[in-house]
Amino acid sequence: MNAIPPIPSGPAPALAGAPPAAPLRDPFGRAITYLRVSVTDRCDLRCSYCMAETMTFLPKRDVLSLEELERLSSGFIRLGTRKIRITGGEPLVRRDVMTLFERLGARIGTGLDELTLTTNGTQLARHAEALAACGVRRINVSLDTLRPDRFTAITRRGRIETVFEGIEAAARAGLAVKINAVALRGLNEDEIDDLLAWCGERGHDLCLIETMPMGETGGDRNEHYLPLSLVRARLKQHWTLSETSYRTGGPARYYDVAQTGTRIGFITPMTHNFCESCNRVRLTCTGTLYMCLGQDDSADFRAVLRAGADDAALEAAIRAAIARKPKGHDFVIDRRTQAPAVARHMSVTGG
Ligand code: SAM
Ligand code: SF4
């Protein structure tokens, strides 16, 4: 992997004081202001809904260097991206990933409004302070259960204590933590009340996600698919939920929880089409840009970068890709073959 030179202190001179760029618009008039960047397909866990136990990871030469990831991200910032979320795989297992946070963090206020992270939390205890120092203010930590044995079963290997320690370290470092939980029939559906109470006690918002049919996992996802409309109806029996207009720039619909003073969000790609307000695109760790999580059309930016494109050529390639953003997705599982609607894994595209 290429070494990254030390970060110069202060704002980048060429950008200091520059007004943020007008955002790119797709053919449907949506402003594209949010980039999710997957920095690795590797992970120290093997969540059963996300990847197969015997997952084969990409050869390192296929993965963009941190410099390449930064260069691409900078191109997007110049074209109006205001928010970047670093994801994976597990982003915090990538060696030297903090140099990317430092470099992108230096762009906050000079084009970028927010730099965030989605993590499984296992490495968070040792990175929380540094993330805060880089300007990260909010992070998402994935946690589907509070029970140690269940956690190890769902992740096929993890120890829940490391995640609890990571969440505590993040809170101490002043990071706002939102907990993401995939709602799974027969696996954690009896724990959603507990998760909400646990989050409420600690001041964390909770965001529930429906399982999406992405990539082979070696199991039958249908078996664990749980519609969030059902979960919400169950929660309303014990909690007072009132819909709010609060948004974080992502696809979740939020409700205030009267008893806790925190919020609960629902991400429902399977039961509710959220495409009309889509403001984001996803970059994989190999430099493939997916204009839609649920469609296969993509643009190969690794080829663009490695062909020696200058900034103007890079920006032209970004504009051309955004011009191909589709109207929306339609996740369906092929009933005959049970094949997932989208062959690539969430860990490749970046959740
Ligand atoms: N490893 C990090 C983590 O787990 O937070 C970041 C990457 S992970 C792919 C991002 C999010 O996607 C996690 O909250 C995870 O639960 C979710 N996810 C993974 N596979 C999914 C699937 N098939 N359906 C719905 N959510 C999924
Ligand atoms: Fe790893 Fe995140 Fe996928 Fe779990 S959901 S296997 S933690 S990438």
Image (cartoon, rainbow, N blue to C red):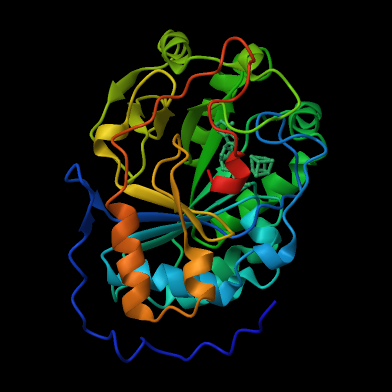
Q: Quadrant of residue 246?
A: top left
Whether residue 85 is visible: yes
**Nearest the eye: 220 or 199:** 220
Judged left or right of residue 274, residue 90 is: right
Asked if 77 appears above or below 34 in the picture, the reply is: below
Spot occupied by residue 36 in the image (x, y as percentages of width and height): 45, 53
Quadrant of the rendered image holding ligand 2: top right
Q: Is residue 311 above or below residue 80?
A: below
Query: Image quadrant of residue 277?
Result: top left
Q: Quarter-wise, where is residue 330 in the image?
A: top left
Q: Is residue 211 left or right of residue 270?
A: right
Q: Residue at x 45, y 90 (%)?
A: 9
**Where residue 25 sits in the image (x, y, percent)?**
20, 53
Q: Residue 120: where, in percent of width, then height?
A: 64, 46
Count of numbered marks? 0
- In x, y percent, where is residue 7? 52, 87
Q: Is residue 51 left or right of residue 263?
A: right
Q: Is residue 13 above or below residue 59?
A: below
Residue positioned 73% across, 64% down in the render: 60
Q: Nearer the viewer, residue 195 or 230?
A: 230
Q: Residue at x 27, y 24 (%)?
A: 243
Tell which of 169 and 88 is nearer to you.
88
